[in-house]
Image: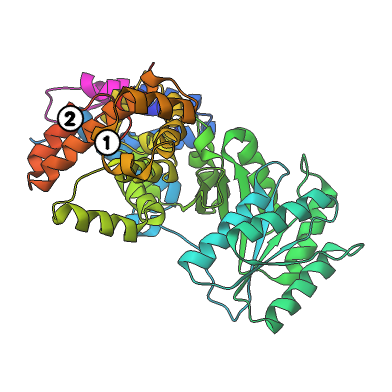
Amino acid sequence: MLENLTERLARVVKNIKGEARLTESNTQEMLREVRLALLDADVALHVVKDFIAKVKQKAMGQEVQSSLTPGQAMVGIVHKELVSLMSGSEDPAQARMQLNLAVAPPAVVLMAGLQGAGKTTTVGKLAKWLRETQKKRVLTVSCDVYRPAAIEQLRLVSEQAGVDVFPTPERANPVDIAQQALDHARRHLHDVVLVDTAGRLAIDEEMMREIAQLHAAVRPIETLFTVDAMQGQDAVRTASAFKETIPLTGVMLTKIDGDSRGGAVLSVRAVTGCPIKFVGTSEKIDGLEAFDAERMANRILGMGDILAIVEQAQKTVDLKTAEKMAEKFKSGGRFDLNDFKMQIGQMRNMGGLSSLVDKLPAQMQQAAKGADLSAAEKSIPRMEGIINAMTPKERRHPELLKASRKRRIAAGAGVSVQEVNRMLNQFEQMQEMMKKMQKGGLAKMMRAVGGMKGLGGLPGMGGFGKR
């Protein structure tokens, strides 16, 4: 997100060189680029003006350390102010805000927002997050009596999240439904109740009156406003309207992966005074991340978010399988096509190449520019299909794969022989790298990775599926 800002800053950093102090003259161009990039990203005008003024105030007269260029020093100031803007604090520890559930159970979390913002899906994602990371017993309930599809959608996402859902009674009003769900939660010892409210296509008095009544009835410990990051200024106006009606405690920002402008992430916190609690990173049920202003600032400034990649790996990688594979190599075992299939499957489970590249530092992202990531991701199931068309013996002993066997495998997988050969070439590159790892040479391994075709030698992705 905010790729435009990232690219503008990268250009300006290169242009500010060789001065020992930041001054109005040598920072003017960079401040102008930052201002234009923020406006292009649909950040609210008054937020941009305030942000630029703070950056300028901090920068003027600041001495540049000998290890830094003036441009790098300026980026450091912009980074600090981005964290402050998105978190409401210059202290990075204060930027990591999650839910306040310090209340006698069940803790009630009320979800508010417009129709189409992804509110019901976000309820399911939050339920899964609470169950898995906080070990909470969660109950969801839909108070949207106007759209039966919303009730069914909540039931489905709750099942995916592995949590209980309270059945919405017919011909009941939202306040009665919420109170019945609370009674049910108390009797069945649920820790948290997530209340999904009715959305509308636009703000209207009836909706606001209804949600105010719901809020008064259930007295939630958290009232979260769900907003679509792609709405830009509309998101800010809507958040302000809800803030005037009910006391919001936080913001859930959805569809952040689909917006290259992303100005809402910088505007909503400043306009509403409410912290951003979570961001939706994909359509999947586990596509929710606790918001971290410092890490978001890193991504905006092209520093990447390697920690997010590590966390995603921890959630998706089968540790038992990985340990078994490690033991195999330690004892001198050979990397075969079964291992290769496992590795490309893990890549798919981590969200694919485009998701990983988005979290890499700008220089690495630049290396991926022009590569057909979608073609590479589409090649993964074809590669798995080719391996599935082999016999168990062929997977363990790839050297058996001569012309006649390749023709049979290609026919079984529904691909050409050339594609089978391409996959085997990529496997051999990976196999060579694993041999170097077995010899204990990390430096050798890194050279092997760098020598693989495609983007940095990502396993199984040589050539990004090019034809």
Q: Is residue 56 magenta?
A: no
Amino acid type for the residue under numbered disc 1: Pro
Instruction: Of the two numbered discs 1 and 2 on the same chain, state the one appearing first in sequence.
Output: 1
Alpha-carbon span between mark 1 and mark 2: 24 Å
Report the magenta residues as a range.
Answer: 9-30
- Which colour assignment does the render follow? rainbow
The image shows residue 28, relative to residue 348, as above or below, that is above
Left or right of residue 87: residue 221: right
Residue with the mark numbered 2: 450
Quadrant containing the N terminus in the rendered view? top left
Could you tell me residue 83's position as x and y percent? 37, 46
Could you tell me residue 270's position as x and y percent? 51, 45
Instruction: Name the magenta segment's main secondary structure.
Output: helix
Asked whether residue 400 appears in the rendered view, the answer is yes
Could you tell me residue 311's position as x and y percent? 36, 53
Other residues around mark 1 within 10 Å, as few (<14) / some (14–19) / many (≥20):
some
Residue with the mark numbered 1: 398
Amino acid type for the residue under numbered disc 2: Gly
Front tag of 1 and 2: 1
Compare residues 33 and 277 and report the one nearer the observer.
277
Farthest residue, direction right: 171
Left or right of residue 244: residue 210: right
